[in-house]
Image (spheres, rainbow, N blue to C red):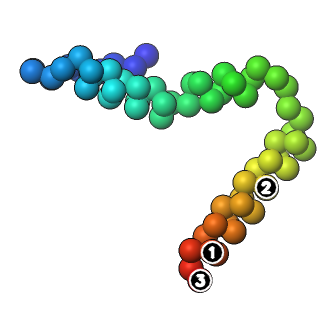
Amino acid sequence: MIMINIKDGESLDKALKRFKKKFEKTGVLRELRSRQAYEKKSVTRRTEVKKAVYIQGLNQEGTI
């Protein structure tokens, strides 16, 4: 359970924004979406490799 302490004089919008950030960091929605459809381990591994290659390509472009 996520607990947010509202500070004195803090607006509800700011408190809600802090709650949303904490909730996003927990990864609950990401996990829920990944469980909606079963994905084989080989497919998961393949997508991770593709992401790594993409990120590595971005890093190499930035250094040139």
Circle 2 sits in a helix, a strand or a loop, which is it?
helix
Q: Mark 1 and mark 2 in contact (Cβ < 8 Å)?
A: no
The percent position of residue 29, horizontal first and vertical second, equals 59, 24
Corner quadrant of residue 12? top left
In the rendered image, which quarter contains the N terminus?
top left
Which residue occupies 82% across, 42% down? 44
Which residue occupies 41% across, 26% down? 20
Q: CA distance from mark 2 to mark 3?
A: 22 Å
The residue where tag 3 is placed is: 64
Circle 1 Cα neighbour tier, 10 Å, few/some/many (<14 / 14–19 / ≥20): few
The percent position of residue 57, horizontal first and vertical second, equals 69, 68
Quick check: 32 above or below 50?
Answer: above
The residue where tag 2 is placed is: 50
Circle 2 Cα neighbour tier, 10 Å, few/some/many (<14 / 14–19 / ≥20): few
Circle 3 Cα neighbour tier, 10 Å, few/some/many (<14 / 14–19 / ≥20): few
The percent position of residue 38, horizontal first and vertical second, equals 85, 25
Circle 3 sits in a helix, a strand or a loop, which is it?
loop
Three-letter amino acid code at the position of disc 2: Lys
Q: Which mark is residue 23?
A: none
Q: Earlier in the sequence, mark 2 or mark 1?
A: 2
Q: Mark 1 and mark 3 in contact (Cβ < 8 Å)?
A: yes
The residue closer to the viewer here, 58 or 31, is 58
